[in-house]
Image: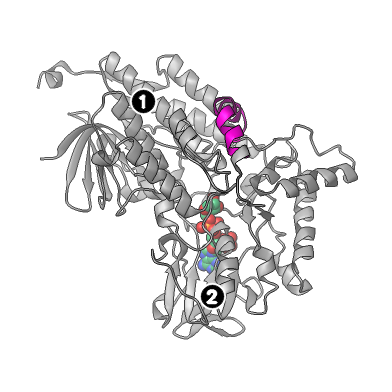
Amino acid sequence: MPQEFDAIVVGAGFAGLYALYRLRERGHTVRVLEAASDIGGTWFHNRYPGARCDIESLQYSYSFSGEVEQEWDWTERYAGQPEILRYIHHVADRFDLRRDIRLNAQAVAAVFDEARHKWRIETGDGEAYSAAFCIMATGCLSVPLDPAIPGLGEFAGDIYRTVDWPHDGVDFTGRRAGIVGTGSSAIQAIPIVAEAAGELTVFQRTANYVIPAHNRPLDEAERADWKRHYPARRAAARRTRNNALMDHNTRPGADMPPGEREAVLEARWQLGGLTFSYGFPDQATDRRVNEAAADFVRRKIAGRVGDPETARKLMPRDHPLGSKRLCVDTEYFEAFNRPNVRLVDLREEALVAVEAAGVRTERTLYPLDALILATGFDAMTGALSRIDPKGRGGRSLREKWRVRPSTLLGLAVAGFPNLFLVTGPGSPSVLSNMVTSAEQNIDWIAACLDYLRANGVVEIEARAEAEDAWFEEVAAASARTLLPEGDSWYVGANVPDKPRVYMPYLGGVPAYLDACEKAAADGYNAFALTPADPAVAAE
Ligand code: NA7
């Protein structure tokens, strides 16, 4: 017999832990199912050297508890993985969350039982659970992709994946290391591996726009200032496009004299990190402004890399700035000035295969002792497609999303009653501060469950026409920008056969929050609500 709960939450990262806290507080019985051997989600898995958040720590943290805000002291502007994981453990302990979390319990199947209005969820460890509601807090970057490179299995050295790095670290001293990928993970790892390794060969397919983090320790005065102003700053952040205070400029770049535009870009560069996206409100929509920012970054690369030929290869030219996620670095380009680091441009010499001795390109064999894969994720839809929930009439979510990843507000899917997503496709999600956006989604879900309970509703399901309308809205928001042009994980370009759809909602957090609020305030008109069946209720 399955174990019965009011709600099952899949995933014990930032989102799943908050879902547990919030739903438990509202009087629901909840069980969290976590595939890993401990909590933390992204921050449990991604332990590669240099792993660090690209949103500032004072903002990339829970807002639901004033006490936690006051008692936790972030040590750096951008927190590293160990510190974020410590924070997650602190919150879990403080609110006694662990007692309702089952670890090593990977959800492998989820089937909606229409007669009972309940989800049945099975885990890889052979357990079964039943609940009226299933909340998928499965993460947006949680299913890693091994690259389709022939011969990976032939490699005689060690293969490491950034996403499941050995917990006690790797000693690269004196070894010939190679790394495939130059996305955010690789860009953080490369300078650190380069310092340790005998040699490091970087295999780059696409050069990326990379902005310096200017990471630094936080001092007591800065922390105290944030602690004094947290409520007001969180509220202000929710009125920004991305749920984060990043000093968003409001003056368009299009009509600015070039000298002035350059000054704005230089100021952004000095601010560092993702703030570079918010130098001009038209940077993502006006090609000339975007190109001015892109050209600025290329010139900075030229200034940071000693060898002009290497600098040229490191300059992105084939996609608008921001159409792949901006990377945030500490000494990334400087690593290429080291005598033990070499760049292989796979656009000039394609990767042919991995062999026992190393990586072979069209030109030569690069002998290696260790190979690091930093090759990305099946983003936003990957985790759910893998579980493949079966909704009304046995309908498969994987099959539905094979056509297009449509949702209503990134929260619900037509054909899948009582299933909720957190930061799903069609919400601002990965374009925003994920912690705050997850909290907002979960607060919406919790309020919805209150409403259903108060009104004797046993089923809630997104209406297909409402979902279609929201999908069009999401598509229109991205069509107003240059951002779908890049072959990014935002559009699923890194996964063979994935439909090319810009998945996150680009209309900004305020518009999204308005839409969520409206969807609740009008009595959930965009959803079909089913009242309790007296026969089942009497059981
Ligand atoms: P990303 O950003 O998806 O980067 C993956 C990298 O791996 C990227 O440079 C890819 O090149 C490269 N890649 C993937 N497959 C191959 C093959 N077959 N050959 C060569 N190179 C390949 O993942 P990250 O983990 O770095 O970052 C993910 C997000 O985590 C990041 O955006 C932040 O939000 C945090 P490509 O660009 O596809 O040519």
- Residue at x-position 79% and y-position 33%: 251
Q: Position of residue 216 (x, y in %)?
A: 63, 51
Instruction: State the separation of the CA atoms marked 2 and 1.
Output: 47 Å
Circle 1 — which element?
helix
| Earlier-in-chain disc, 2 versus 1 | 2
Comparing 312 with 27, the one in front is 27
Where is residue 390 shown, x and y percent of the image?
28, 41
Q: Is residue 419 left or right of residue 171?
A: left
Identify which amino acid the numbered label 1 is placed on.
Ala
Whether residues under marks 2 and 1 lie with C-beta atoms below 8 angstroms apart, the answer is: no
Asked if residue 443 shows in the view, the reply is yes
Q: Is residue 245 left or right of residue 115?
A: right
Q: Position of residue 297 (x, y in %)?
A: 75, 55
**Can you say whether 251 is above or below 460 in the image?**
below
Image coordinates for residue 214, horizontal then vertical, percent: 67, 52
Using the image as rendered, state which of residue 269 and residue 11 is in the foreground.
269
Q: Is residue 235 above or below residue 374?
A: above
For the magenta stretch, what is the residue range?
222-244
Mark sitting on residue 141: none
Residue under circle 2?
A: 178
Residue type at tag 2: Gly
Count neighbours of disc 1 (C-alpha within 10 A) and say few if under 14, some if 14 to 19, many if 20 or more: some
Q: Please determine whether, in this image, residue 258 is positioned above or below residue 67.
A: below
Q: Residue at x 30, y 19 (%)?
A: 452
Quarter containing ligand 1?
bottom right
Image disc number at residue 446? 1
Mark 1 CB within 8 Å of ligand 1: no
**Residue pictured at 43% horizontal, 81% vertical:** 157
Is residue 393 shown left or right of residue 298? left
